[in-house]
């Protein structure tokens, strides 16, 4: 543990577990909420709540003399929050929660691909292999579209579009 006190390590592990539980439950919760609210309304409520929670922190940084790059903040908010959740919620109308989660699992590979293509990062052969395996996995998920009566190719493409939004945002 490299000098980290056991209490801090345990706290960190519990916070990671909480984070993964919340993230993992997003698919089922969203699937249930889109029955009640349309995808756009759900995305708006989600972004509005996030804004109300985080805006005081951003404003407090402004008064502390730290200048935020508001153009980048707004661009990131548009692509990685508003557009991401709008496309994600719309996709969840057309796919099962499990299929949505499987497509979303390609986010790390998409982020790596964006880093290679946009940021000109060098990619090792192992990174390329990981990206290829992820693309192959998404194609396998796409090939099962429509087989369970709840998922569609359109929904999977929308879910993949949300993955692209998140990769760009990251």
Image: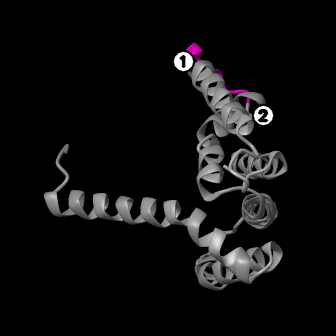
Q: Can residue 162 be found in the magenta stretch?
A: no
Secondary structure found at label 1:
helix
Instruction: Note whether 26 is above or below 141 in the view shown.
Output: below
Task: State the residue position of label 1.
Answer: 126
Q: Image quadrant for the N terminus?
A: top left
Q: Which residue is drawn at 68% across and 50% down?
A: 148
Which of the 4 image quarters holds residue 38?
bottom right
Q: Which mark is residue 118?
A: 2
Q: Which colour scheme is used?
A: one colour
Instruction: Note whether 129 is above or below 37 in the view shown.
Output: above
Q: Residue at x 84, y 49 (%)?
A: 154
- Counting residues from the start of the chain, the first of labels 1 and 2 encountered is 2
Secondary structure mostly seen in the magenta stretch: loop
Return the residue nearer the eye: 61 or 99: 99
**Is residue 66 visible to the viewer in this orientation of the structure?**
no
Q: Give the range drawn in magenta.
A: 120-126
Left-right relation of 59 to 2:
right
Q: Residues within 10 Å of mark 1 (few under 14, many from 20)?
A: few
Return the residue nearer the eye: 130 or 147: 147
Left-right relation of 79 to 1:
right
**Is residue 89 visible to the viewer in this orientation of the structure?**
yes
Instruction: Note whether 124 is above or below 105 in the view shown.
Output: above
Q: Which residue is drawn at 81% across and 45% down?
A: 153
Extreme top residue here?
A: 125
Q: Residue 39 carries which label?
A: none
Q: How crowded is mark 2: few (under 14 residues within 10 Å), some or many (20 or more)?
A: few
Alpha carbon separation for disc pair 1 and 2: 19 Å
Secondary structure found at label 2:
loop
């Amino acid at each position: 543990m490299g000098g980290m006190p056991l209490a801090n390590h345990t706290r960190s592990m519990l916070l990671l577990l909480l984070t993964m539980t919340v993230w993992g439950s997003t698919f089922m919760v969203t699937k249930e909420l889109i029955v009640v609210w349309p995808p756009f309304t759900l995305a708006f409520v989600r972004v509005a709540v996030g804004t109300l929670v985080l805006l005081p922190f951003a404003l407090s940084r402004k008064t502390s003399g730290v200048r935020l790059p508001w153009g980048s903040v707004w661009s990131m908010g548009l692509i990685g929050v508003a557009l991401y959740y709008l496309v994600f919620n719309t996709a969840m109308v057309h796919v099962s929660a499990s299929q949505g989660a499987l497509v979303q699992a390609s986010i790390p590979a998409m982020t790596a691909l964006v880093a290679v293509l946009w940021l000109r990062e060098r990619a090792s052969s192992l990174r390329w292999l990981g990206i290829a395996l992820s693309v192959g996995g998404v194609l396998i998920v796409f090939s099962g579209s429509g087989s369970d009566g709840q998922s569609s190719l359109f929904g999977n493409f929308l879910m993949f579009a949300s993955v692209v939004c998140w990769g760009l945002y990251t």
